Every structure is written in C-alpha cells, then in structure tokens.
Amino acid sequence: AQKVTQAQTEISVVEKEDVTLDCVYETRDTTYYLFWYKQPPSGELVFLIRRNSFDEQNEISGRYSWNFQKSTSSFNFTITASQVVDSAVYFCALSFPSGTYKYIFGTGTRLKVLA
Amino acid sequence: DGGITQSPKYLFRKEGQNVTLSCEQNLNHDAMYWYRQDPGQGLRLIYYSQIVNDFQKGDIAEGYSVSREKKESFPLTVTSAQKNPTAFYLCATRLGTVNSPLHFGNGTRLTVT
C-alpha cells in the first residue's frame, strides 16, 4: 500500500517556540519523491520542499528544516522560532517516477501559532 | 504574471444543477490536476491530464467530468450525479516529470444547497 500519514491533526504553539510536524509514509517502491506544502488561509497550496528517496541529507532553509529518515519512513518538518505567519495547514505528499503520475497526500496538520 | 487562475472563488448552486469550475494556466505546464479538499480528509484526486485531449480518472471521479481541449485550460464539471458536491476544489499543474512539484491555484469553494 502507498500511504502518507500525518497523525497530528492540529498543533498550537506560542510564538518563538519550535515545532515539528510529523510525516510517515508507506511504499514498497525504491524510488519515490516526498514533498511538503503549506496552505495558508487564502487556500492556495505553496510548495516548500522536495526530497527524492536517494537523498537522505537533511535540509535547512532559514527557520525551516527537514529530517528525512528512510529507516523509519519519515520526513519530518521543523519550524524554528515559529511566527504567527507560519499558521497554516501543512501537507506532506508522496509521488513516484512511473505509473499513474499520482501524488498521494496526507490529511494535513493545522498549525496555529499564537502571539 | 505566470500562474494558475481558478474562477470563481465562491460558487453557489442549487441541488440538481450542473456547474463548471474554471482552471486556466499560463505556466506552459503539460499536466493538470483537479483535487477536492474536505475537512480532515486532505486532498483527493478527481481527474488529471498529462497532455491535451487526454485525461484519466482519479480516485473520486464519479459525478465529475473534465475536458482538455487546450493546454491552458482544464475545466471541471460537477454534475448532479455527485452526491456531496459541497467542497473546496483545487486545480494544479506540473511541469515535466513526476518529481516536479505541483503548482496550485487559489481554489474554488462550491456550496450546493
């Protein structure tokens, strides 16, 4: 089965706290791609990062960092020193190089950053 | 500006009426997608199209229809056969191969009463 699980439905933090959004995926394919998207209240999903299955390097972009661990099938997203503007729904997604060109999305995690 | 335009942003219809949601893109992307978003259920794929005049059903295509007569346009019709049409609909495009990210429009919120 191919599946993406975001077990955290909603997280609330106070501004400046660090927060980690979890993403666990299932696939038997050896080649696949993982994505994170942000959906602010305006509704449009914004692409944040892509990682392919052969690249387990963690990545940092400003206050954002991503931890990809194939051993645990996880691709977690950490926001350091959270800000109110980080409030949004965050989606993790999985895609594959062959087949139906589908993207499999998790159910999303709503992050609320309180001032 | 390059982007994806979905119109209208809000749409209201009476039960039993067909309604068409517009999606236009000027990104020159080959692939286009329609997703439905319901609270707590993430994004579910309705239809996708990789090239003009070709499209495939997604996971929840029943009650929906699409066309892809032009590269720039991928309209979605919600028919009266769709049992629960009230939802947020998102159009997306993708350039090149499947490892490319999806680019999304701002969505259309459809309410059927």
Image (cartoon, helix red, strand yellow):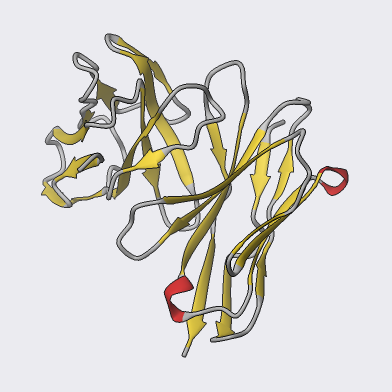
Q: B76 and B25: which one is in front?
A: B25
Q: Residue at x 20, y 25 (%)?
A: B73
Taking the view exactly as shown, the residue that stands out farthest to the top is B53
Of the pair B9 and B3, the residue shown nearer to us = B3
Horizontal relation, residue A4 to residue B41: left or right: right
Please say whether residue A91 is visible from this viewpoint.
Answer: yes
| Foreground pick, B81 / B66 | B66
Residue at 77%, 47% in the rendered image: A57
Q: Position of residue B70 (x, y in %)?
A: 19, 16
- Total marks shown come to 0
Give coordinates of residue B33: x percent, y percent: 37, 30
Q: Residue furthest right?
A: A71
Q: Is residue A96 left or right of residue A115?
A: right
Residue in the image at 28% along x and 25% along y: B28
Residue at 28% x, 42% y: name it.
B85
Viewer can see residue A107: no
Quadrant in the picture for residue A42:
bottom left
Left or right: residue A68 versus residue A80 is right
Vertical comparison of B39 with A104: above or below? below
In front of the other: B47 or A35: A35
Q: Quadrant of the N terminus of chain B?
A: top left
Q: Is residue A24 above or below residue B31?
A: below
The answer to whether A108 is drawn above or below residue B68 in the figure is below
- Where does the image place residue A89, in percent across and percent down from the top left? 48, 62
Residue B2 is situated, as x and y percent measured from the top left of the image, at: 24, 39
Vertical position of residue A50 compared to residue A115: above or below: above
